[in-house]
Amino acid sequence: MTISAVLLAGGKSRRMGEDKATILFRSVPLWKIQLELLRQLEPHELFVSARTDPVWRPADAQFVADQMPSRGPVSGIAAVLSRISSDHLLVLAIDMPFMTENYLRGLCERVRTGSGIVPVIESRFEPLAAVYPREVCHDVVATLSGNDFSLQSLISKLIAANKLEPVQVSKEEKALFHNFNEPRDFKSSCR
């Protein structure tokens, strides 16, 4: 099976007050940290999903504009799923700099034909570090035409349809999913 990868960078970063992608973490911009992580997995294709083509996007990553009107991460996932030529799409959010190659590789190794995998912390899905099968493209696009744009709702439906398999995140792995939404998140993580 082949796997493409996308870095989701389409958020407005309202709570952060500036574009998360260009914020430095340990002296490196978040976009660079996350793209390097995805490159280590040697994906079939590498994408950056955002509202507009970011100036920092390297040439080896294809730009895909979020489907409009923007409905959050669902818009980016829908747009990229409709473009991939692989069997699966690994999704990674721009603001999870603690994620590791080993963890993502482990997710990729667990996928099956026609089914992806989504981590779960307690009873909450982590859809922004997950692997989706190409077959869910229609389901994701259909979500955009409805009234409920919640990834949690969409993931529940995909699990019920056996298109995604939930995998419980261990206590040790939970820190990998820490994301940065506000300036204080950086300060508390850099101590």
Image: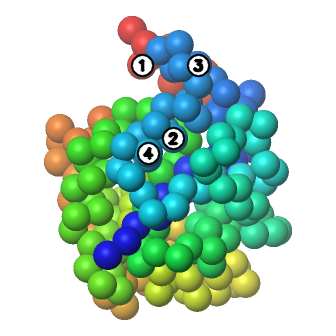
Residue located farthest toward the front when viewing the structure as drawn: 59
Q: In this view, does 180 lie to the left or right of 42?
A: right
Number of the front mark, 1 or 4: 4
Number of the front mark, 1 or 2: 2
As drawn, the label of residue 91 is: none
Number of the front mark, 1 or 3: 3
> Tag 1's secondary structure?
helix
Q: Residues within 10 Å of mark 3 (few under 14, many from 20)?
A: some
Q: Which residue is drawn at 54% across and 56% down?
A: 46
Number of the front mark, 2 or 3: 2
Q: What's the distance in space between the residues labelled 3 and 4, CA to CA?
A: 19 Å
* Amino acid type of the residue tagged 3 in the rendering: Leu
Q: Do the residues labelled 3 and 4 touch (CB within 8 Å)?
A: no
Q: Check disc 3 and report the residue beneath it.
A: 24
* Amino acid type of the residue tagged 4 in the rendering: Arg
As drawn, the label of residue 39 is: 4
Q: Residue at x 71, y 61 (%)?
A: 64
Q: Is residue 1 left or right of residue 65?
A: left
Q: Is residue 29 above or below residue 154?
A: above
Q: Check disc 1 and report the residue beneath it.
A: 189
Q: Do the residues labelled 1 and 3 touch (CB within 8 Å)?
A: no
* Residue 24 pos. (x, y %): 58, 19
Quadrant housing the N terminus:
bottom left
As drawn, the label of residue 35 is: 2
Nearer-N-terminus badge (1/4): 4
* Amino acid type of the residue tagged 1 in the rendering: Ser
Q: What's the distance in space between the residues labelled 1 and 2, CA to CA?
A: 20 Å
Number of the front mark, 3 or 4: 4
Nearer-N-terminus badge (1/3): 3
Q: Do the residues labelled 2 and 4 touch (CB within 8 Å)?
A: yes
